[in-house]
Amino acid sequence: MTERRACVPNVPSVVNKVGQPASIPAHGRDPLDDHELVLGAKRGDRDAFKTLFERYHRRAYALALGVVRHPDDALDVVQEAFIKAHRYLDKFEGNAGFYTWLYRIVMNLAIDHLRKHRRENPVELDETRLETDGDEPLLPRILGGNPGRALHDKQLRARIDLALDELSDNHRSVLVMRELEGLSYEEMAQAMGCSKGTIMSRLFHARRNMQKQLLDLIDHPSAELVADLTGGRSGDADDDTPANEEAAPQRAPAARSRR
Amino acid sequence: MMRDRKAVTDLELMEHADGEPTGAMAAGRIARDPDAQAKVTSIQQMSELVRGHLELSADAVHDAKFAAMWHRIDEQLEAPRVTGLWASLAGWFDRYRGHVITGAVSAGAVAALALVLRPGVPDRGIPGLRGGAIDVRPVALRATPEIDLHDTPGESSTVINLEDEDGHTTVIWLTPADTVEGI
């Protein structure tokens, strides 16, 4: 698994609050690495553990929020995860990174939370079937321009929220693990305690359902979304031409050029 | 060559987009298929949207909330940890608090019902049931029954005349005379 820095999204043009780990001092001295901080925390150094908290709390929160979907519940999960991490720090041998260990705690607590507060889930497709349904393949729909910029669009973000809410707990958990943490299929299978095939099936269906939920927004983007995607705002809102007619011819070539 | 022309599957596309090992053949097929490339790009864009959205949501949480969270965590770390049987029981209760409370309420309700309906208790009717239990007391008699006793050979008879709300009733009760065999 590749360790990413704390909560640094790959979102161009969006300023991230936690772009730098909290423990990087201003004068440029190398920050203490996680291993040293863990050793310090094991010796009872509260500040070392606080540094770990400051380094990873937002990233852990993003993961918890993606799974449990409610901000207050996600905060509870993160708080419980850090308390648990501290309690069992002696058992952490350091074979994997601290965050790898922490995200597993967060993930387990988030899944426990879902089990305790189970809602009516959308019907889950048969996960033993690996074959994709012939009539519902993944869609070759592409947002023209820069999808990172598109996140300025409130409507798009609201729809992403809605689409995540619509997924079943299992589908959403796998999707969030993959997209947020970049785990391999094998790592996700270990974390979820199921087969790699099940993970692939869940991920496929999660992505296809997300696409279906966002399809009309992609095919018929609002003028604001087109402006966000292309980085320009002037004129578009006043133009009578439907946004999709203007954007459509640019979409595929623009997307292909990113590869 | 024949196999190389086979259409690339969505699962292969997904594996390719996620950087999973797919083999050179699948990668080659994807590279030659514009539709497959568009799907790969679509998967990658979706990843970017989901990741960016969640991370921006995390960034939007005010620092004060996390500061308060650390404060609560710090308090928990300071609190002496109770170990042993009591801690295990407390932990178990904490985990299953909802189930325990539901179970206790259900058991209480069953016990209360059993107490109310237990045999041998004067029937005051079931609480909440309109009208209560059925009244089974005997109907009131309009007059004292007239009883005539008659002795006839070998038996005695009793004639009872009753007047009640159903009208006049005569009951004739015949009792054979006590006989002892051989006497």
Image: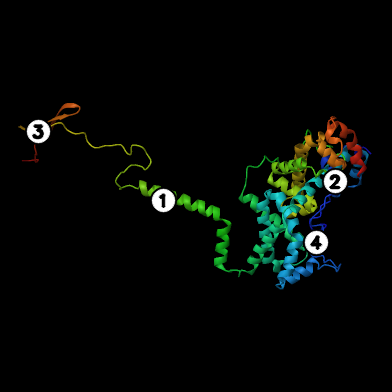
Furthest toward the bottom, the residue is: A43
Gap in Å between the C-alphas at discs 4 and 3?
110 Å
Q: Earlier in the sequence, mark 2 or mark 1?
A: 2
Residue B112 at x, y percent in the picture: 40, 49
Quarter holding the N terminus of chain A is bottom right
Gap in Å between the C-alphas at discs 3 and 2?
107 Å
* Along the line of sight, the residue nearer the viewer: A236 or B155: A236
Gap in Å between the C-alphas at discs 3 and 1?
52 Å
* Along the line of sight, the residue nearer the viewer: B81 or B170: B81
Gap in Å between the C-alphas at discs 2 and 1?
61 Å
Mark 2 chain: B
Residue type, numbered disc 4 = Pro
Q: Residue at x 39, y 48 (%)?
A: B114
Q: How many marks?
A: 4
Q: Is residue A208 above or below residue A20?
A: above
- Residue where numbered disc 1 is placed: B111
Residue type, numbered disc 1 = Ala
- Residue where numbered disc 4 is placed: A21
